[in-house]
Image (tube, helix red, strand yellow):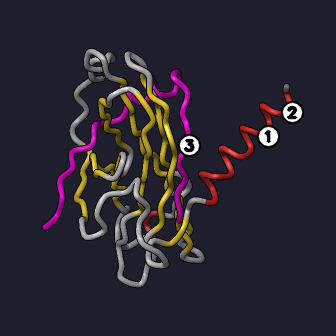
Amino acid sequence: MKRALLCSLFVFFASTVFAQVSATQSPLPAACGPSNVSFWSKAEERSGAPDASPEAGKARIYFFHQIGNTNEHKYSLGMPTFPIALDGKWVGAVHDNSYLFVDVAPGEHHVCVILQKVRKDTPARLELMPIEAEAGKSYYLLTRYFFSGENGLDGFSLSVANRDMARYWLDTLPRSNWKTKE
């Protein structure tokens, strides 16, 4: 039983790692929104945590974003934006240390998060993750961005966050204010 659980967890986490591909090498997966959309995102002034419960009959998915190990002063183009899609529709974007949330109908949903290109010569990267949402429950996802100014490598990860960390982030991080760019 333990072996089956460990194998399932390995496959789950490995699938999110190996899903990080270059969007320039193939079309975006069905979980992502249209590829011709770009986003602007800025963290709002800190104004307190949102109401913790989702709309009646829905589930809530929180998307937290943290900047991991970076050498920011060498990253002259600034921190990138991370558009987020559910089931083929863009639902928002995060930037710097911020969060957003979306209320969804119960059932299976497919998340797509993209590291939006900041330069034409930088390939876009993405992470995919399925979520089985239950009405009245909340789910917490974390994107982490990392950049090494020494060798010019950047990347990000998408993972499930625990409720205690989510509560801390809701109390300390600003909500993301985003819009699409024309």
Instruction: Please provide the residue range marked out in magenta.
Output: 155-182
Tell me how far mark 3 sits from mark 1, CA to CA: 17 Å
Report which residue position mark 3 lands on.
159
* Residue located at (31% from left, 38% from top): 100
Label 2: which residue? Answer: 3
Residue at 25%, 32% (x, y): give it. 46
Identify which amino acid the numbered label 1 is placed on: Cys
Q: CA distance from mark 2 to mark 1?
A: 6 Å
Q: Which residue is mark 1?
A: 7
Residue density around tag 1, few if under 14, some if 14–19, many if 20 or more, within 10 Å: few
In depth, the one of 66 and 104 nearer the eye is: 104
Q: Does the magenta portion include 181?
A: yes
Q: Helix or strand or loop: what does disc 1 sit on?
A: helix
Give 175 or 59, whichever is nearer the viewer.
59
Say if 158 sits above or below 35 in the image: above
Residue type at mark 3: give it: Ser
Q: Position of residue 110 (x, y in %)?
A: 44, 45
Whether residue 65 appears in magenta in the rendering, the answer is no
**148 w.r.t. 33: above or below:** below
